Amino acid sequence: MIRNVFGLIYAGEENHNLRDLVMHRSVAALPVGGRYRAIDFQLSNMVHSGIRNIGIITQKNYKSLMDHLGSGKDWDLSRKNNGLFMLPPYDTSQNTSLYHGICDAIYAKLDYVRRAPQEYCLLTGSYTIYSTTYDEMMRAHIENNADITMLYNLDPPNTDAERFKEVRIETDDSGRVCDIEFDSHIAKSHKLGMDIYLLKKSLLEYLIQSAVARGRYNFVSDVLIPNLHSLRVQAVEHQGYVGRLHSLLSYYDLNMDMLDESVRWDLFHAGAPVYTKIKDEPPARYMATAQVTNSIVSDACEIAGAVHGCVLSRGVTVGRNASLNGVIVMQDSQIQEDCVLENVIIDKYVTIHKGRHLIGAPEFPVIIRKGAVI
């Protein structure tokens, strides 16, 4: 357990590659795996590591995120000392516009950083999905006398035009980072950064103030890369499953990956559990005509049709003779009788009327925005 660390989660990422999914919510609030939100994984990882002081920096569309997190009691973060802190924008006379980047966001919240009694900061984004504890990362940080330690996983270089701010690193035999590629068109390294950094609070404050004073706001290109040879930057490999929410396709693939038993085991069972907001709802109800295979079905669903290889959030209704294959359906949406849906992402509160056919491709799923009536 690492208790001399506070967590700082930047939930202000904007990614238009996620299209309608982030029209009314932040990336951190995206529903994944039926009953979870993206932020649940970061919070659970920190809590299981013994971190009890966590700040979440928001920027836009954070209403649903605040509603989901509440006081933090579902993560045991509703406390008199330390706990969960929401850090919204526009809360000082100096902070009167949108953040230019993560450095600008942290600079606006330096008062929270300075008040934190812990010596170290664990800085993360909110679009990476994985399950771990940070004890090994902390141990490696101290043993290597590192200034900054970052987490990475092995992933083959890709040429996906929808990739979002990829950070690929090269290390020497001791694990020290010797080169970083940021959003490169031709990536050389298989080591893909996970947007997780451990460093002393005093160093973070110095680096952020130095960058902002020079009009630089990106943590990787404006802080890490220029200081790569003056600071000791170490890298630690995460060997489990890692999903990233950097495009519509990656969101679809992440949810489909969760239908794989080995991925579910790695995310939810191999380590500590993933906590989320508890809702007291009845179990799913399966009618006599229901056919369900290899799917995630959440509480309060009512199924009378065929559901194969799908992820259904709470309160979803599937009518008689409806056929769903490779479909992600978010909370309280209704698919009426005789509908045929394949490779579709359906947001919350959507109604698909009787007999509609919506067919997408696994590489290009159809997306139905929140509240739509088809």
Image (cartoon, rainbow, N blue to C red):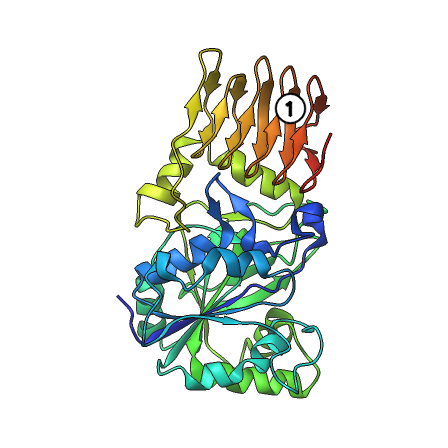
Q: Residue at x 40, y 82 (%)?
A: 116
Q: Is residue 100 toward the left or the right of residue 147 in the image?
A: right
Q: Amino acid at mark 1?
A: Glu
Q: Eyeballing the image, is 171 above or below 30?
A: below
Q: Crowdedness of circle 1 by 10 Å Cα count: few (<14), some, many (20+)?
A: many
Specify the quadrant that holds the N terminus: bottom left
Position of residue 126 measured from the top left corner of the image (x, y, whole percent): 53, 59
Q: Residue at x 64, y 72 (%)?
A: 218
The reply to whether residue 127 is in sight is no
Q: Eyeballing the image, is 234 above or below 351?
A: below
The reply to whether residue 93 is in sight is yes
Dot 1 corresponds to which residue? Answer: 342
**Where, by quadrant of the figure, is residue 45 drawn?**
bottom left
**Where, by quadrant of the figure, is residue 57 drawn?**
bottom right
Position of residue 136 measured from the top left corner of the image (x, y, whole percent): 31, 62
Q: Residue at x 65, y 35 (%)?
A: 350
Q: How many marks?
A: 1
